[in-house]
Image (tube, rainbow, N blue to C red):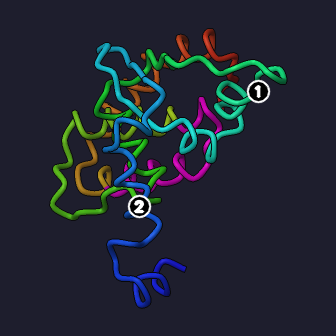
Amino acid sequence: VDSVVNDIFGAEDSLSSILSRSLTKKSLCDVEVAGRDEVPVHVPSYLLACHSEVLERVFYSQDVGEQPSSHRRVECPFADHRAIQASVQVLATHTLSEDPEIEASESSMRSVSQIHLFGRVFKIPSLESQAVRMARRMMNKTPCLVCAAFDEFIASEKLVSREYNLSSS
């Protein structure tokens, strides 16, 4: 579909381009997502709700006549702001950067693990699978990164299981 839109309107009018631009418009970013580093990431609630029934219920299931809160915040104690920003970008564009020049480092692997967990917590399978593909590419380049991924998983698992009622998968 995006290729047809690009042919007719140009790449700047593709759905992913429009959604990416919406991330920069303060008036559309009505939700604050805060991670363990407490750096807020401002996000349009509609983008989160379209991908996650969990977040749709959080943002849009008020009683009839009840107005939604003007300041909404989602806590993600298992991720830092870079992983949250990357997760949101994937939701807007459906791609996790596949740049072969991305450094296969411990820091990058921890971020990818956090992106995977964001998808798992909020039940966004496409985000989970994008993160798994990226993690596999990184581990194939640098096998010792398996340790970083495992460390991140262990560090977050108890917190996430307790806070979000998830079972291991």
As helix, strand or loop, the secondary structure at mark 1 comes to loop
Q: Are marks 1 and 2 in contact (CB under 8 Å)?
A: no
Horizontal side of 70 relative to 32 (left or right) equals right
The residue lying furthest to the front in this view is 65
Q: Residues within 10 Å of mark 2 (few under 14, many from 20)?
A: some
* Label located before the other in sequence (1 or 2): 2
The x and y percentages for residue 58 are 67, 24
Q: Nearer the viewer, residue 147 or 165?
A: 165
Q: Residue at x 57, y 53 (%)?
A: 126
Q: Does the magenta stretch mainly form a helix, a strand or a loop? A: helix
Q: Residue at x 65, y 38 (%)?
A: 123
- 92 falls in the magenta region: no
The x and y percentages for residue 158 are 55, 12
Q: Which residue is mark 2?
A: 18
The residue lying furthest to the bottom in this view is 7
Q: Which residue is mark 1?
A: 61
Q: Residues within 10 Å of mark 1 (few under 14, many from 20)?
A: few
| Rendered-image quadrant of the N terminus | bottom right
The x and y percentages for residue 67 are 68, 20
Q: CA distance from mark 1 to mark 2?
A: 26 Å
Residue type, label 2: Ile
Residue type, label 1: Ser
Count of marks, rendered view: 2
Q: Which residues are magenta?
A: 119-137
As helix, strand or loop, the secondary structure at mark 2 comes to helix
The x and y percentages for residue 29 are 42, 35
Q: Residue at x 32, y 72 (%)?
A: 12
Q: Quadrant of residue 47?
A: top right
